[in-house]
Image: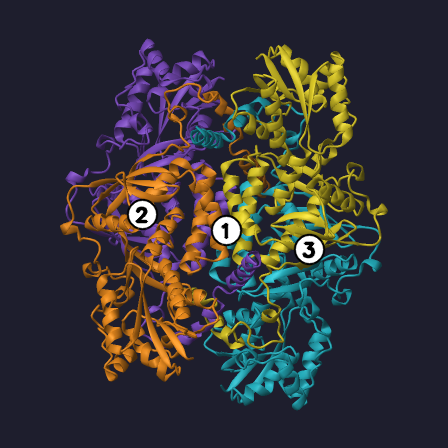
Chain colours: A orange, B purple, C yellow, D cyan
Amino acid sequence: MEKVALAFSGGLDTSVCVPLLEEEYGAAEVIGVTVDVGQPQAELDEAIETARALDLEHHMVDETEAFAALCLRSVRANASYQGYPLGTALARPIIAQAISEVAQAEGCDALAHGCTGKGNDQLRFEAVWRRSSMEVVAPVRELGLTRAWEIEYAADRAIPVEAGNEGDWSIDANLWSRSIEGGELEDPTSIPPEEIYEWTAPISSRPTEPAYLTIGFNEGVPVSIDGEALDPVTLIEQLNDLGGRHGVGRNDLMEDRMLGLKVRSNYEHPAATILLMAHTALEELVLTTDERNFKRYVDDQWAQKAYEGLIDGPFIGALEGFIDTTQGRVTGAVTMLVHDGLARPVARDSEHAVYSKEAASFNTETVHGIEQSDATGVAKYHGFQERFVSESMREQQTDIEE
Amino acid sequence: MEKVALAFSGGLDTSVCVPLLEEEYGAAEVIGVTVDVGQPQAELDEAIETARALDLEHHMVDETEAFAALCLRSVRANASYQGYPLGTALARPIIAQAISEVAQAEGCDALAHGCTGKGNDQLRFEAVWRRSSMEVVAPVRELGLTRAWEIEYAADRAIPVEAGNEGDWSIDANLWSRSIEGGELEDPTSIPPEEIYEWTAPISSRPTEPAYLTIGFNEGVPVSIDGEALDPVTLIEQLNDLGGRHGVGRNDLMEDRMLGLKVRSNYEHPAATILLMAHTALEELVLTTDERNFKRYVDDQWAQKAYEGLIDGPFIGALEGFIDTTQGRVTGAVTMLVHDGLARPVARDSEHAVYSKEAASFNTETVHGIEQSDATGVAKYHGFQERFVSESMREQQTDIEE
Amino acid sequence: MEKVALAFSGGLDTSVCVPLLEEEYGAAEVIGVTVDVGQPQAELDEAIETARALDLEHHMVDETEAFAALCLRSVRANASYQGYPLGTALARPIIAQAISEVAQAEGCDALAHGCTGKGNDQLRFEAVWRRSSMEVVAPVRELGLTRAWEIEYAADRAIPVEAGNEGDWSIDANLWSRSIEGGELEDPTSIPPEEIYEWTAPISSRPTEPAYLTIGFNEGVPVSIDGEALDPVTLIEQLNDLGGRHGVGRNDLMEDRMLGLKVRSNYEHPAATILLMAHTALEELVLTTDERNFKRYVDDQWAQKAYEGLIDGPFIGALEGFIDTTQGRVTGAVTMLVHDGLARPVARDSEHAVYSKEAASFNTETVHGIEQSDATGVAKYHGFQERFVSESMREQQTDIEE
Amino acid sequence: MEKVALAFSGGLDTSVCVPLLEEEYGAAEVIGVTVDVGQPQAELDEAIETARALDLEHHMVDETEAFAALCLRSVRANASYQGYPLGTALARPIIAQAISEVAQAEGCDALAHGCTGKGNDQLRFEAVWRRSSMEVVAPVRELGLTRAWEIEYAADRAIPVEAGNEGDWSIDANLWSRSIEGGELEDPTSIPPEEIYEWTAPISSRPTEPAYLTIGFNEGVPVSIDGEALDPVTLIEQLNDLGGRHGVGRNDLMEDRMLGLKVRSNYEHPAATILLMAHTALEELVLTTDERNFKRYVDDQWAQKAYEGLIDGPFIGALEGFIDTTQGRVTGAVTMLVHDGLARPVARDSEHAVYSKEAASFNTETVHGIEQSDATGVAKYHGFQERFVSESMREQQTDIEE
């Protein structure tokens, strides 16, 4: 390969890749690309500094707005993979695409990432990259590097990585979620220590009074807080801040990775928790039973494919054909109670409510031309087939006893 | 009809049914049957007193243990209908069956309930009762009675009902859950007032320190708290008490009733919340991805049929064929954090964990004969078909542009 | 009611409704509406003649083209309810809507049908009609009429119905399918007699040579036969004719009606059989595995709702959001072998094929950057979680044995 | 590796593996194992002869009965993967297990197969083998061999393979199905030539008279033909023979392989076609609507996992928990019409029928306590929610127009 574009975070994995791409893959030139999807400023700064120390040509691309838009699009699908709102998974295709575009513009003939061979990110990056004609390489995976080897190698070459700063934790943070894995969390019986949390306040320092806030939705997309229209980035940031102060959005999961490995994952995602709950609550009011029942399966599939990094594949496109149609009526507002780790809906409003106070109430007579006695026929047919089975089984049993 | 057994709660609906069964249906004799499924003692007392005042032959049947066992069986199915753990729905078939048996023993030729024609309970009662050869009648529904009419009728006959005592609320409580509907809750935009809650403490009076408790499971059934083996009734009661003090288990839903009406429902169910979350957390550890994915659908169907009162039908039997097989490995323990309205799992333990610390860790080399570089092939095939579609679409687009 | 529009076929049920609407419902005026959806000309003629004999104001509405379009739209959903391509079910909402429009234009205040209380059609008619403010009545159901009673009543009034002409069979035919129920078919153990078939040739008189015909599709809709573009009505008629001569499209089913009754149904639908098979065969070539797998469930739901007559409800709208997106690539042609009762695909062609001869062939080396050895990693991960379970179960078993 | 057990068919792939295992993998000793699952005797003979010519220690294991039992077990799951009844897929785990047991008995430390890196069989073999501690090798895949290379290599070593005898076709046959791939079939637009078929008669030589035969089922398993009890092997053989003479069981599919490649497959499987159709027809009669609807999804999952070779994994175990429960009532008989390429059910009989002639008939009055007019209430509620949506949408539209 002549010139390779490396997905560069400034962490240990991607830093050791820089010399390795030259030494092991014969790259004539390496450029590093960092994509901003709302990770902490310190991380972005670290990338810039490490690149400078490595004498690496470095490109920074800001995709925060595109990423925020995708996060809100995922709310329409109630997107959750086994309880996880997919922060990292949603970011990867955007990052991969942005790097691919830099590579193209810079005349690269290869793309590289520093993902290991055990995780999901390698598959998400390459799902995007392998659509191009550029070569794709993954030094950490292909050379079978361990963390220990990398630390030693970095020390040998005086590569300025802050290994160990994070303690044992493997952390990924962006606008939508912060994940913590590794260390003692790898033991499923260990209770996560308070130190792993950065976005959510500990019990001891949360406000004693609950907050009530009203999320406005337009066709399934959250657009306002307490009536104030907000752009996606600001809306998510405000909810992360507010929810975080109340300790909302902690999550402890056993997650099935794509390769079949289970992993213990802890997450923080205050805004995602609030928005996903509010969206579901609004759907409860405006979707028909059939729509609600089947959308669960559609949403499950959406989350599965998004987890796999196939966000722009034809299948998600088709699922969104279903989702879009339903979301036309998901316009309205939901009031959320946020307090001490908990968020839950307490009121809903929509002009598209499939709801009639008169029909549901026990205090009214004929409504919509339906009288109480009309339910008698429904009751007679309810469980009709089941009655046959009971009979046939009872007869069978009688036969046996005789 | 000669002798009719009436499902009797001592409330307004069932009290007015007593004279109506004689007047309107020509019943020669009416007996009242109350089934104990863990409702508050005051309710049971009210039934006894009202029966005495009505000069009604009254039978009390205790099915609390059978009901508790069914609730724990529902935990194996992660049973939740649109977020509601099905307390009333699970109780109805047990109540109906118990009444049917009393009726048989007492030589009745008819069965009666006081359910309205808008709700679910009429269908649940009759799904059981219509399997027998006894006549089934439902005065409130068939005569189209309203609450206002009943109050006037009761006053005319000096029927001693405590109408209005509950305020506007329509309430049903048993061991597993307490539901609150009606009144201002019928407006989906209203925030439920604090007064509707009886089981769960208000924010102002909850403990400031979180509780950690460990739920032990044997083949999917919760059997112990913090290592102490408990019978089902005690286990549920202890968790309702503990969870209730922490304010856990409040729930505000728009629920799709069987007839197609949506209704605003509020619930309290501390034990159910804790047990369902703990059970799911254990399944995360011991079930394979395929089992987890598909069991969601199996569980959905279980909840749907249980909501319909068809708990002993052939379909639930078949679903439990699936569930039983998976639950053989759902043995272990889950530690729950319970605090200020929130319950969530923080640790899991099982000898059947589909988990290998070595396999998942980023600090290990070859495990189970698999090396990092083995994932390269997986990555190459990931999204393979999607690449075709992109190509064909890109070509198509090119054709269009030309 | 003042003026009622009656869905009128000229058969026994709807003919006795004419006087009954006046006598029993007090209708001042009755008009009959017959909607042409491709039923045999003799049926339409019978309606006209019977109306004349009854002195009934009669309206005939031709909806054949709209119905043909809906049938082809159903092909995109591979529409089949338990094996039945839904001819009657798809026709009913179109008929109901057309009658509703005549009623509106004629100033009617009520709508009536002659369906019994056991079948599906009552529910399909009323799903459309009850959206309007007109009254809906169903004399046969509401008065609990039996066929025997109707025959006697018709004889008394000299109503000129050809009762019994059809023998015992209950038949419904339109452009898409012909159904035969009743008589000895009600015994599931009886083999249907040859006389029930009208569209499909008996074994003894079919061509000995097979026919090969190529169906062209545009975005999932069949548009041509052997390269000749045809309008929907003509396309269906030609295939009914050709397929019928070869005896294709007979179908013997136990069908679950909406009320829970099972019924023995026999069908003839040559065009539907050929088109549905051809469409599926084309989807095999152009849809990804994910799309194929999930579309089965989407299609199932579509068929369920179409069977229920809810073709224009929001849920089918959402399902079609999914379907439409996938059908964008279902353009191409399928060659069908048609012979002696059997139709099956034997060749497929599309520019959107998710297929690479080179990739699939065993005679090629590296394709799309993938080598044979890349599958080694896939094989190592295949069944990874299952290996854990085997181990844990084996250990458990060992424990037990010790 | 010291001693390796090779899955040996005597074909080109496995024959070249014998010297390659010694030359390239350093095997000290190779033994060949052929497992009989009902493939043609000529194939078994070829394996023996080639082994002799190669001077290979050869083991033959007869698993025909176990395989036949598994095939009939698959009938209970209506097992079909995209239309294919899974003959090869079901055989592979049995073959792999038998070889593994020979290897263990013979003191081998390694297992080898000759599958390519593009197909499914490599994954199915290894899903079984990788549960053991023996090494697993796959020379054709790992060395990236092509057919052309193998032919030349075999010629160089005078390995006596009958390459090319089969023409271009890649064929696999066992008791349950015969598959034909490759050659001109790789072009999806080509119509398969008559020469590819061996089990099914051409149109020109089929009997002119149809056959009617009655398949008896006991708890979902086919056990008799026309009342004569037959063991599984005989039952399948008789139906392959009879169905084959009538040309039944040809199948032309685009199949999605596990790696994501689509492949054009042609199959012959007369017995499978007849048995699967008959079984479905019996389920139509005895299962409730809920059971039928959901069993489709259970069966789909069963077929998916069986296709993947994970027949003895925990997920299929759980699915069979569902299936077993339903099959308790699938006892009875189905009469099949078999003629000229077509098989279809024409009569069904079971004592567990969820069917009442009286209930379904249009000629009866009150049945099971239900009157026609009881359906009026059902009709009023049918589509209730959909009416809200129509209204809200209509209002919305009106708003827009104003």
**Image disc number at residue C334:** 3
User: Mark 2 = which residue?
Assistant: B275
Q: Amino acid at mark 1?
A: Ala
Place of residue D358 in the rendered image (x, y in percent of width and height, measured from the top left):
65, 29
Question: Mark 2 to mark 3: distance in Å?
Answer: 54 Å
B230 to A363, vertically: above or below: below
Q: Callout 2: helix, strand or loop? A: helix
User: Mark 1 = which residue?
Assistant: A318
- Does residue D255 appear to the left or right of A133 in the view shown? right
Mark 1 and mark 3 in contact? Answer it, CB < 8 Å: no
Instruction: Please state which of residues D276 and D376 is positioned toward the viewer in this rendering.
Output: D376
Q: How many marks?
A: 3
Q: Callout 3: helix, strand or loop? A: strand
**Image disc number at residue A12:** none
Question: Mark 1 to mark 3: distance in Å?
Answer: 23 Å
Q: Residue at x 40, y 61 (%)?
A: A93
- Does residue B292 appear to the left or right of D210 in the view shown? left
Q: Amino acid at mark 3?
A: Val
Mark 1 belongs to chain = A
**Residue B244 shows up from this direction:** yes
Q: Are marks 1 and 3 on the same chain?
A: no
Question: Mark 2 to mark 1: distance in Å?
Answer: 37 Å
